[in-house]
Image (cartoon, rainbow, N blue to C red):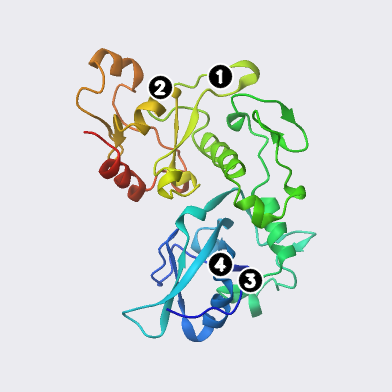
Amino acid sequence: MFTTSGMVKAVFIQSSHSGYDDQPGRAYHFPKRQYLSRVEQTVGDWVIFYEGRRGGGKGYHTVQKVLEIRADPHDPQMAYAVLDQASELSFENPVPRWVEGQGPYETGLPRSRGNNTSAVRLISQRDFARIINAGLAARDDPNAIPRTGDFHPEGGFAEDQAPFALQDQPRDLLLSQRAFRDRSFARQVKHAYCGRCSMSGLELRNGGGRPEVEAAHIVPVAQRGPDTVRNGLALSGTVHWMFDRGLISVSDDGRILVAKEAAEESTLNRLLVPDRRLIEPADPAFQPHKAYLRWHRENVFKG
């Protein structure tokens, strides 16, 4: 373990094709000689993850807190930034590094070479806020409309509580507020599944085109589950109730599992799709992570 020298925000570059032992949502692997002094400054603070075109092209896509730094037991030249799994929040909108006519979101970042190639970049509070504003701006998307509440043109659709305005709150405080995170998570999951229940196949809409479907955490918030699309399922009310109580679950290959005596077969035939297979988003980046599904089977499912 290493000592820390302060709390500073940063951008961590992460690639699906990287040779590093990155564990998305859990740990960030980095060479100590190049980046230890920078990563030390981020402990206890928020960092934004970025993926370039070569790694998948997500841009700035997730924000999360760094808990501590641990040495790599297998390589003395490497270390891990251990991440607070419960703090992870995916962006509603992918944010590009560079906007034509406006320049970069990170002040002074060159278009190529120089600091642009650095895997860990410390950023100002202002740049952090700009990226968060862009990434977490509510989509004007009919699939993400909440089931109740009024539409606010300046802030998207709001539910029963007063809407959040990004510009009115310090970003650190906003990112820690459960109500804000729940709304963002719900919008992201409903968008990913196009307002359709992933187990019944139903796409019901009430007044104003609002989808009936709910956003369910696979690993619950109470168990430090992250607010990311891959930890979510779009479920209708009854199916959501059954999932939370372990009466149904999902296998790694997408089969819907039903606990013994969960319900009469005739009832299940009305509730679930005929082939008993999860309807997943077309985009692999939105599909449920096997680790979260496994957690649900091992800790919640009563089968």
From the image, state whether disc 4 or disc 1 is nearer to you.
Answer: 4
Residue 158 pos. (x, y %): 67, 32
Ranked by sequence position, the earlier of labels 2 and 3 is 3
Secondary structure found at label 4: loop
The tag on residue 238 is 2
Q: Quadrant of residue 216?
A: top left
Tell me which amino acid carries mark 3. Val
Give the residue type at disc 2.
Thr
Quarter-of-image position of residue 16: bottom left
For badge 1, the amino acid type reads Arg
Q: CA distance from mark 2 to mark 1?
A: 15 Å
Asked if residue 74 is positioned above or below residue 51 in the image, the reply reads below
Q: Are marks 1 and 3 in contact (CB under 8 Å)?
A: no
Secondary-structure class at tag 2: helix
Q: Amino acid at mark 4?
A: Gly
Residue designated by label 1: 205
Q: Is residue 180 above or below residue 147?
A: below
